[in-house]
Amino acid sequence: MGSKGGKSEGNRSMFGDFDDCGMEGREDTIDRYLLGELSLEEINKLTTHLLECKSCLAELEFRDKLKEVIEDDGDTIFADSARTMLPERRRTRSVGFVHGIRGYVKYPWVVAILVIAMVTTTSMLVFLDRSQPVDFLAELRLDEKVPVPFEPDYLSILRASSQSQRTRVDSLTTSFLAAMRFYLEMDYAGTVQALDALESEIEGALAQSDSAKSVPYMVRDYLFFRSIAVFANCRHDIETRAPALVGCLGKALAGFQQSFAFAEANELAQVDGCRYFQGLSDALLGNRLTAINTLEKVDATSSFFNDAVRLVASLNKE
Amino acid sequence: MRNRQEEKQFVKRIRQGDATAEDKVVKYLHPSVFLNIARKLQGRPDDVEALVNDILMLVIEKMREGRFDPELGKLRDYAGGIANNKTGEYFRKLRLDGKYLDITSTLPDVPLDHEGEELIERQEVSDHLKKTLNGLDHKYKKVLELRFYREMTLEDISAAISLPKRRVSERIHYAVKLLRKKLQKDKDFSIFGFLLTISSCGLRYGF
């Protein structure tokens, strides 16, 4: 973040071209500052410079305004670009090829034509292979029921717990199973509502009863099923690639991550499919590498293993 | 913090004593508060940092006490309000200490209500910027979306769109430059249009 040029008066107009004061990576640093990616020490360094350099201050002002507009109206501004979240194709560099080969081959143009023909054929083959994109919507299979993998000990632990705990936890279980009924009927909006109503009750139970062993299982399942239901509710946005998709999937993804982390922290078995749905959400959000990374970790014993392998293969093709 | 929902989550986390959430809110608000104060305290750069820190601490305290309600407005605007009060307090204190000379008293016919005008001007700039953003080429719009809307890091964007990190960075800066150029062009055109209208009126009515 060093400044080479020292003070600069610059152009104070928000629209004008700003003088470059010579600060290394000025725009990147300002963007990182606006997006909260700088450490406090870096912020102090930058603000000290900004107070001396009007040109950089004007640059910050413009970018801050841009970020504010995007933050407020991003949904409408980027409504159409939500369709294209897939990576751009890599470009091959061909400049200088013929010139470079001249010293080695007598007829470079013949070689060049042959190479071009080979490249064209290969690219056509690659194109044909890529012409079938991943149908994420089919991957969701939301017209089928996602299996409900209840912990087998879940209810037996409950039965074994003491009478006073049972009364409290029992009512919670009844409400939880009622919410699950909405889920099994594929009423996803109803599931979200019913689980939301349980949120404070579950948090309370978790905080108070250390000995009720069924509660942690319930929290894990609650987080997972709430995310699945949120996920299912995104269906319309997925079909239309609406801007709301990012927020909707983001919520589901956060829920899967929470469920996973909670199970890990409490040494519980993971809900089958938790990793798979995490990866699927990431894939839909366009985080290809994270998605591949997550999907590759799906356990071979999981009933979603084959789906995960297929999805990884499709994502690798892109 | 893109929406009210996210702000609500941060309020909840801060009320539960989550220090990471506090750190994120401070870093999120720092640029806007800093710009606000740097604009107002021109000529007094030494006090900017301390005042910015005071304001941010106050915002966090109020959030801890549950006095910020995301339903009533944006966190950024809430911090802006606190910044205005604090700056007022700062200047009052300077005046009482006799260290502050009110230069506006020496200027003739200075309009008193600048805030309203500024607000309208800022709204106009926002509308204009939004329109220009909409007309931007798709590839530039996409990098701006990923960086500023989805708040992805350069590394993540690079992985997502399969472009080297340096190219992503260059593309973002070019997109911002392009935006600024278009805005400047529109601004020049509107001034030119205004002058043209005045001159044609002048010719028609003979003055």
Image: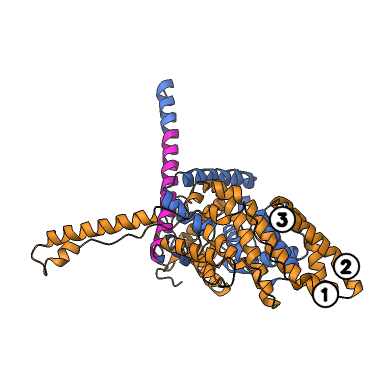
Q: Residue at x 49, y 63 (%)?
A: A310
Q: How many marks?
A: 3
Q: Colour of chain A?
A: orange
**Pointer 1 indicates a residue of which chain?**
A
Discs 1 and 2 share one subunit: yes
Residue A231 part of the magenta-drawn span: no
Residue B187 part of the magenta-drawn span: yes
For residue A12, the mark is: none
- Identified by mark 2, the residue type is Arg
Discs 2 and 3 share one subunit: yes
Q: Nearer the viewer, residue B138 or B97?
A: B138
- Label 2: state its secondary structure: helix
Mark 1 neighbour class, 10 Å CA radius: few under 14, some 14 to 19, many 20 or more = some
Q: Which residue is mark 2?
A: A168
Mark closer to the chain start, 3 or 1? 3
Instruction: Tell me, yes or no, if residue A86 can be seen here.
Output: yes
Mark closer to the chain start, 2 or 3? 2
Instruction: Tell me, yes or no, if residue B70 can be seen here.
Output: no
Q: Which residue is mark 1?
A: A212
Q: Colour of chain B?
A: blue
Q: Disc 1 to disc 2, how far (Cα)? A: 10 Å
Q: Which residues are magenta?
A: B166-194
Q: Disc 3 to disc 1, how far (Cα)? A: 25 Å
Residue A51 drawn at (x, y percent) = 52, 65
